Image: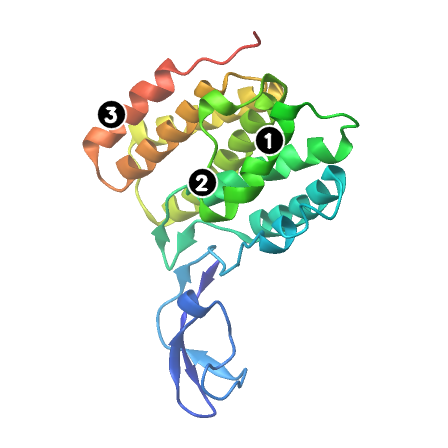
Amino acid sequence: MKIRGERECTECGTRWSYYETGSVGCPACGSLQSVGVDERTEHTDMQVAFDLTPVRNAVDEVESDDLAERARDRCRDYVRRRGFVNAGTLRELDDTYLAATELLHVADIVAREIHLDEREELYFLALLRDADQGERPPVADVPTSLRAARGLAYANAVREYRRDIRTWAEDRELTTSQRGALETLGEHVTRIRMLDGDIEPQAAEQLITATRDLTNGLRGDEMAFSQAQERLTSLEFGET
């Protein structure tokens, strides 16, 4: 949505940026009465904290399914409120969002699974340990039984990110090639979702790389755009 992010309090005259604070309340006096002093700008990136510390602190106190439910709830709230356009600027598809999305899907499996093998449990705990720090387990560590969770998580993340790209691009003139690349990205997302995410982890990672190259390309980096086109063309998904 488009908002006037630079605010001025009508009570005390303090000016602040909603883009930075994420609050309509005046930081000086707390008043909710303010006016916008800038032009309306596209903004979907809400200020939202992502902290898994309370969940991690319960590792030795509760069973894995209970732990997973707590992690899932925090990830769901974070992912639901996140966006990628900040004051008219398109942000990166960042690792914290990807890790949170993957933990959301993995935790859902863990919460429903009666028996976890050691590798599955260690992978879940690795995500829980590092997701809010923007760190993701490497491709080689993904258990076969959880690869669909990563594939579907990344497809969903790219789907939401692509939606914000289209919002950001509404006030811009994309070239035919750029619009084509964006459509191809959407087709890949649809294909992965039809496979319920059951693709090789390396392919899921290539989807993210292609998306990031495309982002830089849409910002004007011609080399990155060419790389994005090549990656999108070479991406293949299928059941194995």
Residue 31 falls left or right of residue 38 = right
Furthest residue in direction top, as rendered: 240
Residue annotated with mark 2: 135
Q: Earlier in the sequence, mark 1 or mark 3?
A: 1
* Residue 234 in which image quadrant: top left
Residue at 54% x, 54% y is 50
Q: Is residue 117 visible?
A: yes
Tell me, for residue 122, which label it has, or none. Answer: 1
Residue at 24% x, 31% y is 224
Residue type at numbered disc 3: Ser
Q: Nearer the viewer, mark 1 or mark 3?
A: 1
Badge 2 density bin: few <14, some 14–19, many ≥20, Cα 10 Å? some
Seen in the picture, residue 9 relative to 92 is either above or below; the reply is below
Seen in the picture, residue 148 relative to 23 is either above or below; the reply is above
Percent of width and height locating residue 217: 27, 35
Q: Looking at this view, is 36 or 210 the one in front?
A: 210
Q: CA distance from mark 2 to mark 1?
A: 15 Å
Furthest residue in direction front, as rendered: 60
Percent of width and height locating residue 211: 38, 32
Q: Nearer the viewer, mark 3 or mark 2?
A: 2
Tell me, for residue 226, which label it has, or none. Answer: 3
